[in-house]
Image (spheres, rainbow, N blue to C red):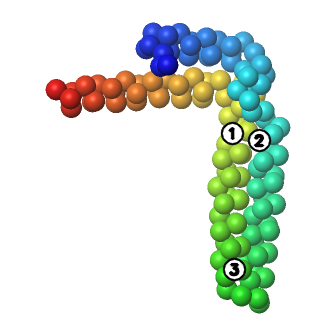
């Protein structure tokens, strides 16, 4: 069941107030912690090194191993960057401003989408 616009705004305000008052609790309620995101970034770095070893080692064994190593490197890079950005966003209380801004932005985009859908149906 979707929330009304007023209910969504109220929920966003409550979320922002909670994040401003107690960033650690807000992070816990979101389900992600700063430490876990950093751990994922480190694991992604390890995956990158494994992919690099596969890329270089594949030159001696078979070209397909090199391709697989490259794909592993690429996936580890993407996951590592995403994890690192999330760890930076959730730490030191700075994530609260970003999360609130993100919610506002998404709310504006959803409202614009609804208006466009209403205009096109006429």
N-term-proximal mark, 3 vs 2: 2
**Residues at marks 1 and 2, CA–CA distance in whole angstroms:** 7 Å
91 to 16, vertically: above or below: below
| Proximity of marks 3 and 2: CB atoms separated by less than 8 Å | no
Viewer-side label of 1, 3: 3
The image quarter containing residue 100 is: top right
| Proximity of marks 1 and 2: CB atoms separated by less than 8 Å | yes
Residue under the point 64% across and 12% down: 17
- The one of 72 and 80 positioned closer to us in this rendering: 72
Residue under the point 68% across and 39% down: 86
Classify mark 3: helix, strand or loop: helix
Position in image of residue 97 (x %, y %)? 61, 24
N-term-proximal mark, 1 vs 3: 3
Residue under the point 67% across and 86% down: 63
* Viewer can see residue 51: yes
Position in image of residue 62 (x %, y %)? 71, 88
Q: Is residue 1 left or right of residue 97?
A: left
How crowded is the residue under tag 1: few (<14 C-alpha within 10 Å), some, or many (20+)? some
How crowded is the residue under tag 3: few (<14 C-alpha within 10 Å), some, or many (20+)? many
The dot on residue 86 is: 1
Give the residue pinned by disc 2: 37
N-term-proximal mark, 1 vs 2: 2
How crowded is the residue under tag 2: few (<14 C-alpha within 10 Å), some, or many (20+)? many
53 to 46, vertically: above or below: below
Position in image of residue 80 (x %, y %)? 71, 52
13 to 50, vertically: above or below: above
**Residues at marks 1 and 3, CA–CA distance in whole angstroms:** 30 Å
Give the residue pinned by disc 3: 66
């Amino acid at each position: 069941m979707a929330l009304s616009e007023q209910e969504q705004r109220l929920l966003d305000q409550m979320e922002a107030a909670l994040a401003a008052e107690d960033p650690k609790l807000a992070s816990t309620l979101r389900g992600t912690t700063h430490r876990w995101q950093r751990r994922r970034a480190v694991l992604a770095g390890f995956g990158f090194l494994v992919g690099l070893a596969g890329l270089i080692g594949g030159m001696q064994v078979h070209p397909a191993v090199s391709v697989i190593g490259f794909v592993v490197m690429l996936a580890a890079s993407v996951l590592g960057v995403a994890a690192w950005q999330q760890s930076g966003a959730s730490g030191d209380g700075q994530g609260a401003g970003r999360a609130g801004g993100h919610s506002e932005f998404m709310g504006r985009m959803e409202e614009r989408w609804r208006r466009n859908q209403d205009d096109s149906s006429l």
